[in-house]
Amino acid sequence: QVQLVESGGGLVKPGGSLRLSCAASGFTFSDYWMTWIRQAPGKGLERLSHISNIGGRTYYAESVKGRFTISRDNAKNSLYLQLNSLRAEDTAVYYCGSLRYGQIDYWGQGTLVTVSS
Amino acid sequence: QSALTQPASVSGSPGQSITISCTGTSSDVGAYNYVSWYQHHPGKAPKLIISDVSNRPSGVSNRFSGSKSGNTASLTISGLQAEDEGDYYCNSYTGDSTLLVFGGGTKLTVL
């Protein structure tokens, strides 16, 4: 069955960096656009970034543009999100998901990023 | 792209039916039949319960149904059960570089 498993979250100081990974299985990863979504404590779902199936097209929300970088390795069935210059307001659970016409058919279980000194 | 508008909360008693609305614009909800609904329980991954306005993925209870009229999509849950309590989010395809837009979420309380 389809599985998306995020990893790489943790506690980081303001200004620090993290690299999140999302391992995909159970579907043809290279056929799908992919996305990162986050949920901050007490807040709703926020779209962060997405990437086309072969990686040529990317999008970033204004809140993370210039600080986060999305990438993928289709040979490894993996999606990544590099988080730089982290701020307290980036504290959230980060989810990866598979996209189909803007709809997220499959979600990972999430990885928690906590930005605190 | 502004967020889709959902009521902050709805409630109902076991066995009753409730409907959650999701209002967008003629550029998103009104333009495409690519509206989804997700159920989110705290600490768990969001779960797709309706896609393409009214399609129920395999394994999702037929108590969940979706519809759309103009710029407003709706999720109806019939025969409310305690396990339905949680947060519900809608989202729509936008057709531009942003690709998708979410609603702010609706907290469902089963009384």
Image (spheres, helix red, strand yellow):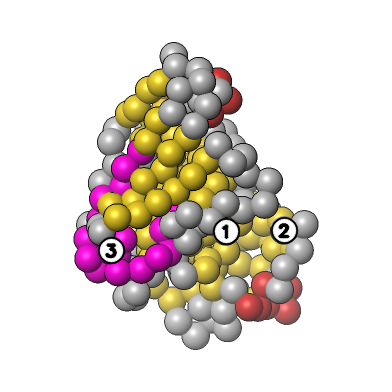
Point out the frontmost of discs 1 and 3. 3
Q: Is residue A41 above or below residue B16?
A: below
Whole-number angstrom distance, CA of label 2 to CA of label 1? 10 Å
The disc placed on residue B30 is 3
Q: Is residue A101 left or right of residue B26?
A: right
**Quarter of the image where the C terminus of chain B is located:** top left
Image location (x, y in percent) of residue A66? 34, 69
Q: Magenta segment, which residues?
A: B20-36
Please give the name of the residue rendered at 37% of the width and 36% of the height, measured from the top-left corner.
B19
Please give the name of the residue rendered at 28% of the width and 36% of the height, measured from the top-left corner.
B7
Image location (x, y in percent) of residue B77? 47, 35
Is residue B22 magenta-colored? yes
Query: Disc 1 designates what residue?
Result: A105
Residue A9 visible in image: no
Residue B53 lies in quadrant: bottom left
On what subunit does the disc labeled 1 rest? A
Return the residue nearer the eye: B46 or A65: B46
Q: Amino acid at mark 1?
A: Asp
Point out the frontmost of discs 3 and 2. 3
Image location (x, y in percent) of residue B55? 53, 56
Return the residue nearer the eye: A49 or A97: A97
Residue B35 lies in quadrant: bottom left
On what subunit does the disc labeled 3 rest? B
Residue B104 lies in quadrant: top left
Q: Amino acid at mark 2?
A: Val
Whole-number angstrom distance, CA of label 3 to CA of label 2? 31 Å
Q: Is residue A6 above or below residue B64?
A: below
Return the residue nearer the eye: A70 or B12: B12
Query: Disc 2 designates what residue?
Result: A2
State if disc 1 and disc 2 touch (CB < 8 Å): yes
Q: Name the secondary structure under disc 3.
A: loop
Q: Amino acid at mark 3?
A: Gly
